[in-house]
Image (cartoon, grey):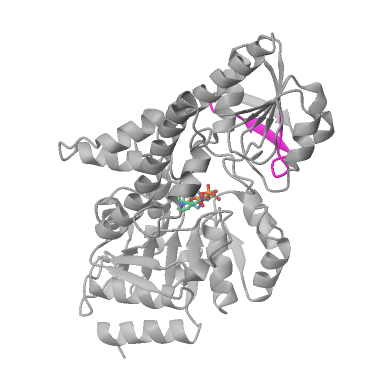
Amino acid sequence: MTLTSLDRTAEFKRRIETREARIGIVGMGYVGLPLALLFSEERFVITGFDVDPRKVETLNLGGSYIVRIPAAEIEQARKSGFSATADYARIADMDVVIICVPTPLSEYHEPDLSYVTGTVRSIAPHLREGQLIVLESTTYPGTTEEAVVPLLEKGNPSGLCVARDTVSHGFYVAFSPEREDPGNDSIARRDIPKVVGGCGPAAAELASAVYGSIFSRIVPVSSPEAAEMTKLLENIYRCVNIALVNELKQLCMRMGIDIFEVIEAAKTKPFGFQAFYPGPGLGGHCIPIDPFYLSWKAKQFDFHTRFIELAGEVNIAMPYFVVENIIEALSQRRKSLSGSRVLILGLAYKRDIDDLRESPSLTIIELLQKRGAIVEYNDPFIPSAGQGRKYALNMTSTPLDRVPEFDCVVIATDHSQYNYRDIVSKAQLVVDTRNATRGIEAVDIVRC
Ligand SMILES: NC(=O)c1ccc[n+]([C@@H]2O[C@H](COP(=O)([O-])OP(=O)(O)OC[C@H]3O[C@@H](n4cnc5c(N)ncnc54)[C@H](O)[C@@H]3O)[C@@H](O)[C@H]2O)c1
């Protein structure tokens, strides 16, 4: 008996409802692994695909390599059938394949889609009729239709095409951005509404059914492009507003006004204002990178994205601003940066996480080293650091009991487990880029 496409859609949804559907998640990183665990909690049998054999092995032994994911959660998922593999042939067993691989920038600040295209090329030979492929990696509008769909269509030996409605045969494709905010426990992941844009209504319907089983609310949009752009709007909004407060912080410092006091006061307005906070610069795999995916794409439309460029300019300059303040603070104590010992507190790009990708702390360390400072760092989440931004750092975390030895201690990331009062009382000089020492009165604190 052959199934009509309508029957196939109904059958797909039945398999989702009964948890018979097999879900494969490609990329077992910060996005893919938590997503796999969320599906697993909802009784789906999940297969995690990754090209990194160490990750595959760790997961299959019930271990974790992400600090905020306890090994017990992996172990629990293993009991519910979760396994990891590097073998793409197993894609053929999946009903749904969700792609969560990196989307970095190239050396020339252009989108590097090689992880996405490499993944899609590996999936294509194993595609089968009725499968749903969803891209979650953040990218410019048009990627799903212009890069993913053609590679899947070209690369599968059965000549399958994307099914854009319920009567066509083929496979289904959708884009659904990941909106997680690592380290932010104020909202459960399942309560972050999930935006879904399908290549046609059937794909949107199936992707909504899949995500509807783990997310409280699905937000369908008309196309993958609209979903891709939604994610970029969210991140650009954040990037631009952080740049705005970073610029106003510098002005406030000149004017002798406390920007943090101003933000707290502005925040009391019940409408039309959302608080963003200044810091030593942008970090992470998203906010410093994603906006440039759009500026690159915009050029194809003869469009110059001025807000993105300006925000990038301000945010990129922030580590330099911090270093200038360190130099000034030391010189007021009759010390030169060259030869001074500086301890950076916090290597992660933000509080209470173990992710140092694009972290401004790395740039600050490199700028300080270049100017002759002897630099060490402490980070409770990052015991050692190999690669910096431009060269290998090969450093290990310095214990906090050595704080008094340093000419300057720089609070670059405000991890919540630091005892700031204790650090201030022991340090010779503290440069605080996060307002972590608010409420502590001491002459040896410079806030910038
Ligand atoms: N980290 C975040 O907070 C966050 C939030 C929202 C969106 N995103 C987006 O999600 C995507 C993934 O980010 P991430 O932080 O999870 O990255 P990550 O580097 O933590 O994980 C990516 C994983 O993909 C694996 N991988 C790379 N190429 C592969 C291939 N060809 N086949 C199989 N596996 C492969 C890597 O080994 C790695 O384990 C990016 O587009 C990012 O912009 C990330």
Q: Is residue 330 visible to the viewer in this orientation of the structure?
A: yes
In percent of width and height, residue 225 lies at 25, 57
Q: Could you say where residue 117 lies in the image, as x and y percent from the top left?
A: 37, 48
Identify whether 217 is placed above or below 270: below
Q: Position of residue 399 (x, y in %)?
A: 81, 34
Between 448 and 4, the residue placed more toward the observer is 448
The residue sitting at the bottom extreme is 1
Magenta-drawn segment = 377-389
Q: Quadrant of the N terminus?
A: bottom left
Residue 201: quadrant of the picture: bottom left
Q: Is residue 341 left or right of residue 401?
A: left
Establish if 289 lies above or below 47: above
Residue 383 counted in the magenta span = yes
- Residue 11 falls in image quadrant: bottom left
Q: Nearer the viewer, residue 52 or 176?
A: 176
State which quarter of the image contains the C terminus: top right
Count the marks. 0
Residue 106 position, x and y percent, is 40, 33
Q: Is residue 416 magenta?
A: no
